[in-house]
Amino acid sequence: MSGSKTPTSSSKRHVINQKDIYTAQCNLCKKFRLIDTQEEFEEITHKIKQEPFDCSKKANLSCDDPADIEYDSSQTWVKYKPNNPKTPEGFKRTLELRNDYSKLDSYYITPTGEKLRSHSEIAAYLEDHPQPSGVSASDFDFSSPKVMQETILEFIEQQ
């Protein structure tokens, strides 16, 4: 469901962030469409089973228009599970691609800038920083999207 650019060096972990590309595949024509923001992408993936994405959900777009991006190995692509929970307001979800491109690790950045890696860390943070909106540890999902192996560049696989 989403593609992200591959880093040019395997010496650093690649963090998926605002400069990366979010896409959704049209349920009707199967073309990939660019999604403007991580928040919009999370909204689409959160309810994808109940409301499948199609080209008409984007302004001035139809299945007759060319694809925004092609699924190929010019970038490393990842596939999200359907119906992922949205990131609670004030928090930011980040994903870090492992050096060997085998998996993405999921983290949350808190409103105070702390990086949390597990439900227990989230629970401890929420205990120390009660959220006005009633956010709980169960509102966070640490599952990772699947790295699509066929889109990993050959020179990276050989390292």
Image (cartoon, rainbow, N blue to C red):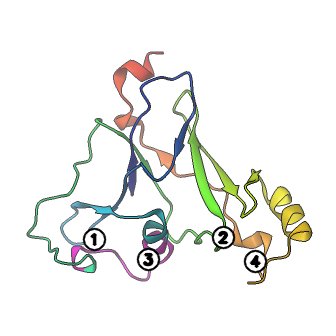
Q: Amino acid at mark 3?
A: Lys
Q: Amino acid at mark 1?
A: Asn
> Disc 2 designates what residue?
90
Region in magenta: 43-56
In this view, the mark in front (2 or 4): 2
Residue at image position (39%, 82%) is 51
Which of the two labelled residues, at mark 1 and mark 4, occupies the earlier sequence position?
A: 1
> Disc 1 designates what residue?
27
Q: Position of residue 49 (x, y in %)?
A: 44, 76
Assess disc 2: are there few (<14), some (14-19) or many (≥20) residues with their C-alpha within 10 Å of its C-alpha: few
- SS at badge 1: loop
Extreme left residue here?
A: 64
Q: Left or right: where does residue 2 sit relative to residue 123?
A: left
On residue 135, the disc is 4
Q: Amino acid at mark 2?
A: Gly
Tell whether position 98 is magenta.
no
Assess disc 3: are there few (<14), some (14-19) or many (≥20) residues with their C-alpha within 10 Å of its C-alpha: few
Which of the two labelled residues, at mark 1 and mark 2, occupies the earlier sequence position?
A: 1
> Disc 3 designates what residue?
49
Q: CA distance from mark 1 to mark 4?
A: 32 Å
Tell whether position 44 is magenta.
yes
Instruction: Decide which of 28, 138 is in the foreground and name it.
Output: 138
Which of the two labelled residues, at mark 4 and mark 3, occupies the earlier sequence position?
A: 3
